[in-house]
Image: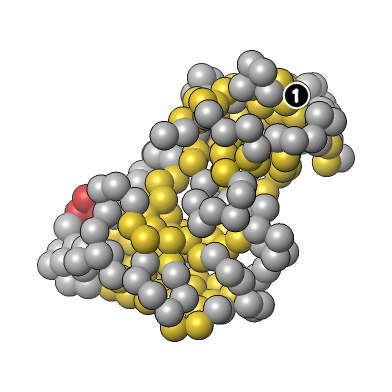
Amino acid sequence: SAVISQKPSRDICQRGTSLTIQCQVDSQVTMMFWYRQQPGQSLTLIATANQGSEATYESGFVIDKFPISRPNLTFSTLTVSNMSPEDSSIYLCSVAGIFGNTIYFGEGSWLTVV
Amino acid sequence: AQTVTQSQPEMSVQEAETVTLSCTYDTSESDYYLFWYKQPPSRQMILVIRQEAYKQQNATENRFSVNFQKAAKSFSLKISDSQLGDAAMYFCAYRETGGGADGLTFGKGTHLIIQP
């Protein structure tokens, strides 16, 4: 399995500001994904981070709010823009394993917007 | 769109006993993957077990096993000899195969309580 590191692990943010979350994988992976987990809820897929092209967003998520970069096969960032208290969530980076049939998760970034 | 349903918001079991968590899903695909993930209070998502839909044999990982009923679109998780460390949220998840770039679709989760 891949080792996935996320930064920051936790942060308290002021409303109206933006925060960028970094995801680093210890090996090259084909697919990287970003999920959101709101308090007491399940995980929801935000987007697939595509290397060398624009991310593919799920319904309800837009690039202006959640810009994503993936400059290479081991690194991706998710920015949460113009934050409001409703953006208080855990944001999780995940990758597909070498055969693409299992998805592994980073430890998550817990954001609180005040 | 695929949906995953976990009908048990919370389950409780005595330590050393066996518990079964339910999961059903809806898909028109014939080949796909199913997963159970564990999320302890640390919030780390930990893979418990994986099942490929084309395999008839139920997956097993130590004390964890699944009952995969493809026709019924059912994928339950059985935990034997429950331990205090098994206490967590458990999420059932679905993913298509075929080389697609789809991520996981999750159920709402089941909170498992282990009574000492």
Determine which residue is flagged by label 1: B67
The x and y percentages for residue A28 are 63, 77
Q: Amino acid at mark 1?
A: Asn
Judge from the rendering whether residue A55 lies leftward or rightward of residue A61; answer left or right: right
- In the rendered view, tell whether residue B114 sits above or below residue A37: above
Q: Residue drawn 41% across and 34% down? A: B1
Please tell me in which quadrant of the rendered image residue B112 appears. top right
Observer able to see residue B89 = no
Q: Secondary structure at mark 1?
A: strand
Category of crowding for the residue at label 1, using alpha-carbon neighbours closer than 10 angstroms: few (below 14), some (14–19), many (at least 20): some
Please tell me in which quadrant of the rendered image residue B24 appears. top right
Q: Residue drawn 51% across and 65% down? A: A32
Q: Quick one: B57 or B17, which is closer to the camera?
A: B57
Furthest residue in direction left, as rendered: A16
The x and y percentages for residue A71 are 44, 83
The x and y percentages for residue A46 are 36, 55
Judge from the rendering whether residue A75 lies leftward or rightward of residue A67; answer left or right: right
Furthest residue in direction bottom, as rendered: A71
The x and y percentages for residue B42 are 55, 53
Q: Residue drawn 47% across and 33% down? A: B2
- In the rendered view, tell whether residue B33 sits above or below residue A71: above
Observer able to see residue A67 = yes
Q: Residue drawn 60% across and 55% down? A: B99
Judge from the rendering whether residue A68 lies leftward or rightward of residue B18; answer left or right: left
